[in-house]
Amino acid sequence: MARNAELTRQRLLAAAADEFATLGIAGTKVERIANEAQCNKAMIYTYFGSKEDLFNAVFVVEVADRIRAVSFDPADLPDYAGRLFDCFDTNPNTVRLYNWYNLERPGGPALASIGLANENKLGRLEQAQADGVVADHYSPIEMMTLLRSIAATWATLSHSSLGPYAPHERDRRRFCVVDAVQRLIRTG
Amino acid sequence: MARNAELTRQRLLAAAADEFATLGIAGTKVERIANEAQCNKAMIYTYFGSKEDLFNAVFVVEVADRIRAVSFDPADLPDYAGRLFDCFDTNPNTVRLYNWYNLERPGGPALASIGLANENKLGRLEQAQADGVVADHYSPIEMMTLLRSIAATWATLSHSSLGPYAPHERDRRRFCVVDAVQRLIRTG
């Protein structure tokens, strides 16, 4: 019985991730998620609370946990950017959910939890700069935001604007990310 | 009379830009735009057609026209990135509207119109590379997408994730964008 409940929860989370990633919070219909997961709508409220709460649960699994799982080494930022690219490339929902949340709930609590994990990375980056391991022409936060933008370049590409012209080979896209961050942190 | 109609249209466009930028297409209520512009809802349909059509009209003015107005010189990409930053910094609605549209209408026609303007830029960039004016370690589309991501770095920063740690001085943010693109195109 407890196992069944857990399976239902997982099915709902997976259906919700796809629906929210496609349509955002305002655009999502809880009913459609229930249909997709072969549940009834009442179960969503029982398991998760409101639509908002369901989104937050999805966000933790698909965005916060995923980004946190990408191992960070301040001494090798190009590699970190490459691993972030891998994460975004393998999980297309991750960047979309992040962007929806950033637009729809700019001051939302789930983003704040990512902020905390970043604080730790920024501290380690600062230390690495003080130790002379990383160039310091940018402050830690400047370096990190530029790196994040570069790592998400292909994931945020518009399908109908620059998208059609972009290289489709995963390796080439990854190379651009790693190479750009290498240039970014080069001294002098 | 024609002048009044034009003023009403302008008022509606301005109100719609703020509403769509804040709430997206799905989240926007046409009624609220009408109230804000001191019109009635029927006038929106008379002037623009559907909510979708109204969004497209806003997109042309606030995104497509604005980005097109940023002068492009393939021989000075860091400067172009700086001007793009200025555009995004002065018009916070521009990047938000672009991001909403990219999420809500990934294959929408308005983005395609931006794509066409990009085609021209990519052609000029390719020529500049062939002439040896610009480094060619990235293809034109790779260079352009990386440059765009870097230029939009601060505009897409989450208020509750990395946002609070970021430098607030406009000059410093601009410096980071221009400097990062300088590094990006450095030969060798």
Image: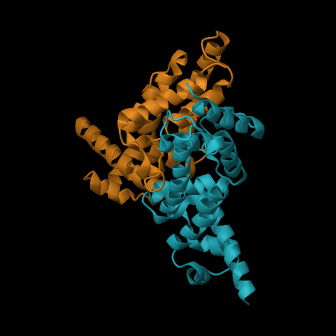
Chain colours: A orange, B cyan
Front-lying residue, B82 or A57: B82
Front-lying residue, B125 or A183: B125
Along the horizontal axis of the image, is B45 left or right of A170? Answer: right
> Residue at point 51% right, 35% down?
B136
Tell me: residue A179, above or below residue A74.
below
Q: Position of residue B75 (x, y in %)?
A: 64, 42
> Residue at point 61% right, 39% down?
B160
| Residue positioned most to the front | B131
Q: Position of residue B111 (x, y in %)?
A: 50, 60
> Residue at point 41% right, 52% down?
A164
> Residue at point 64% right, 75% down?
B34
Point out the image quarter for the N terminus of chain B.
bottom right
Whether residue A50 is visible to the viewer of this picture, yes or no, is no
Point out the image quarter for the C terminus of chain B.
top right
| Residue positioned most to the bottom | B1
Tell me: residue B52, above or below residue A125.
below
Q: Position of residue A63 (x, y in %)?
A: 45, 37
Q: Position of residue A134 (x, y in %)?
A: 61, 16
**Quarter of the image where one finds residue A167:** top left
**Quarter of the image where one finds residue A123:** top right
Whether residue A137 is visible to the viewer of this picture, yes or no, is yes
Front-lying residue, A119 or B118: B118
Along the horizontal axis of the image, is A181 left or right of A49? Answer: right
Q: How many marks?
A: 0
Tell me: residue B72, above or below residue A121.
below
